[in-house]
Image: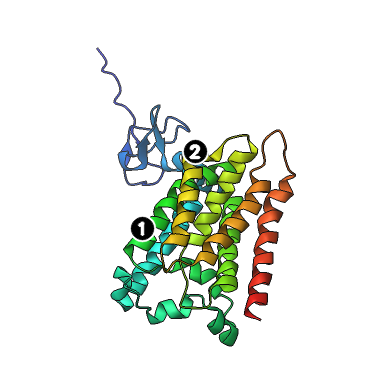
Amino acid sequence: MSLPQPPILTRCYRHPDRETGRSCTRCGKPACSDCLVQASVGSHCADCRKAAQPDIKTRVRYASAGQPTLVTSTIIAINVAVFFWMSAQDIGTLSGGGRVSQAQFDLGLNRIMLGQTHHWYQLITSGFIHFGFLHIGFNMYILWQLGQLLERTLGRGAFALLYFASLLGGSAGVLLLTDRGISGGASGAVFGLMAALAISMHRQGTNIFQTSIGRLLMLNLVFTFVIPGIAIGGHLGGVAAGGLCGAVMLAPKWKPVPKWAVYATPVAVGLFAIAISVFAVG
């Protein structure tokens, strides 16, 4: 009576010194346990696993799609990082007790100082400095709420343009109406986002005073004039810039605007705000 022949063991395609009785269920190559990865069906070798993965461009697109508020989160992260960087240099920055640190002075906005130094980057950097926890906490909370609505609607590029157009509008308002102290904060940009959303709702036939956005905008405008120490020009400038952008960028679906206008409008508003700033400084 003859006995069955013992199985013939092959060698792993990556480790020739190892015998194996297993193989890739996709390509059939013999492979040892270290070279096989469990798949949804069977086990795949390292080469098949690599071939089944999407390319870098596709993986980046998938990762990007999972971050619908990437621009909003990035802006908040920059603001928070700048705040704690300034706090590390001067602990008084945390409390916002009225004292201006050297970093706030260098990055903040003042018409007289800007006229002497011509540091035009302060039109942007002033929007990323804050005076105390309450200041940055309020601005970042409102920015997060608005960003979740607007960034999903406009898309990242258009939302970023809207934000910085509003920021530049706020800076122009500061230079027109304020000549004392150092001004800074994301308030101008945040007010611009609120105004853009309110204008959008109004154009769609919604009574904004019956919405939380409309009430929030009006309440903050009242605080702007009632609470001392607030840069009135920054808030009004942000509202003007954001409102102009929102009227075009967030037009009703039954009155669509060309795609190029969605991007050209905030660019034009931002450039106009810069021109106003230059004029105000003289």
Q: Is residue 127 above or below residue 117?
A: above
Mark 2 vs 1: CB contact within 8 A: no
Q: Residues within 10 Å of mark 1 (few under 14, many from 20)?
A: few
Residue extending farthest bottom = 116
Q: Earlier in the sequence, mark 2 or mark 1?
A: 1
Q: Residue at x 63, y 35 (%)?
A: 204
Specify few, some or many for label 2: CA neighbours under 10 Å numbering under 14, 14-19, or 20 or more: few
Residue 264 point in image, percent of width and height: 71, 55
How does the figure colour the protein chain or chains? rainbow
User: Residue 32: x and y, percent?
Assistant: 33, 39
Residue at the image position 60 percent from the left and 69 percent from the top: 172
**Which amino acid is tagged 1?**
Gly
**Residue beneath disc 1:** 137
* Residue assigned mark 2: 211
**x and y, in percent, of residue 114 in the image:** 56, 81
Q: Quadrant of residue 129?
A: bottom left
Question: In the rendering, at what x and y percent does residue 28 appear?
Answer: 45, 32
Q: Is residue 243 above or below residue 36?
A: below
Q: Nearer the viewer, residue 282 or 127?
A: 282
Amino acid type assigned to the residue bearing label 2 in the image: Thr
Q: Visible in this render: residue 69? A: no
Q: Which residue is found at the position 60% from the left and 63% from the top?
A: 169
Tell which of 161 and 50 is nearer to you.
Answer: 161
Q: How far apart are the alpha carbons under marks 2 and 1?
A: 23 Å
Q: 39 or 86: nearer the eye?
A: 86
